[in-house]
Amino acid sequence: MALSSNCWKYLVLTFNVLFAMSAVVLFGASGFLLYRLFVYRHFIGVNVEYPAVLLLMMAIITCSIAWIGWRTAKSMHQIHVIMAGILIMLVVVIEFACFVWAMVVWDNIEIDIKTTMTSYFMDTMDIKEANTDTIRWDRLHVKFQCCGVSGPGDYSSLGHVPFSCCGQGPLDSIQKPYVADCTTLFQRGCGNPLHEYAKQQLLLVAMVALVASVLQSTGIFCTFFLAHAIREKRRASIRNSTIAREATFAAPDDSLLASPSAPAPTLPKY
């Protein structure tokens, strides 16, 4: 038995509540992942962050569309409900495109990170005193327990390695930011650890976008089924009105025959 228009209405209203809640979750997840990529933007490049940025924007737009879908479902206007369904479809398509984009970046991120890190490392090497750039490298060394891009050999031209390559943490300009020897020196470079870190974050972005697009796609079916139910209800209403009107005009008027005061028919006079 087909569901009535009221049943589809309440299903769509429930979906829009869940749609708004998913937007809040999506906003938090994409914002968190964007932050984890943003803090290393100087090493991995800003193009790696774009899928997370798009996902964050879609979370904001989804909240607005959920409100529109709620209003259209309550109004029960077919054209408005169809427009809301089209907007939900666009959101789902863009989120799925975000998933594809994140996977493409994930597949090509190794080349991008090595190029960006090498360029940034060479720019930092030209600076003789400690500044914001050297502190960023110090924090990266301590975080991933690494040194340079490929290893401590990257600092061979300077004749010393940063103190952070010993795992002691970044130092300010008052102290000595660089020392000649370390008791324990990180031997691995930061290229591979940062590459694995960025791939993990991008994979999470892709999975969040995929799950969001799959779950939110159910609203497309509910919305268009509601539009179909509204149309069928309108057709049934028009059909019932037409039948009632035809029955009214087709029924014979026997009121004159049944009335006792009706005059008897007479022959015409000539």
Image (spheres, helix red, strand yellow):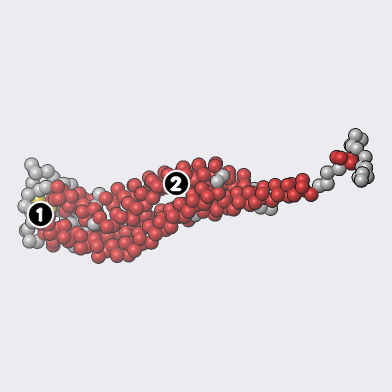
Residue lying at the far front in this picture: please name it.
Answer: 270
Which of 267/168 is in front?
Answer: 267
Q: Residue placed at 37% from the left, 52% from the top?
A: 55
Q: Residue placed at 20% from the left, 60% from the top?
A: 116
- The residue that disc 2 covers is 65
Q: Is residue 18 visible?
A: no
Question: Sequence-wise, which precedes: disc 2 or disc 1?
Answer: 2
The answer to whether residue 255 is above or below residue 209 is above
> On the image, which quarter does residue 6 sit in?
top right
Which of 20/233 is in front?
Answer: 233
Q: Which mark is residue 181?
A: 1
Which of 132/8 is in front?
Answer: 8
Q: Is residue 172 left or right of residue 8?
A: left
Estimate the x, y position of residue 194 in percent, counting from the top left: 26, 57
Callout 2: 10 Å neighbours few (<14), some, many (20+)? Answer: many
Which of 65/192 is in front?
Answer: 65
Q: Disc 2 or disc 1, which is closer to the eye? A: 2
The amino acid marked with disc number 2 is: Ile
Callout 1: 10 Å neighbours few (<14), some, many (20+)? Answer: few
Q: Residue placed at 18% from the left, 47% from the top?
A: 169
Estimate the x, y position of residue 166 in percent, counting from the top left: 16, 52
The amino acid marked with disc number 1 is: Asp
Estimate the x, y position of residue 158 in percent, counting from the top left: 7, 58
For label 2, the SS is helix
Q: CA distance from mark 2 to mark 1?
A: 60 Å
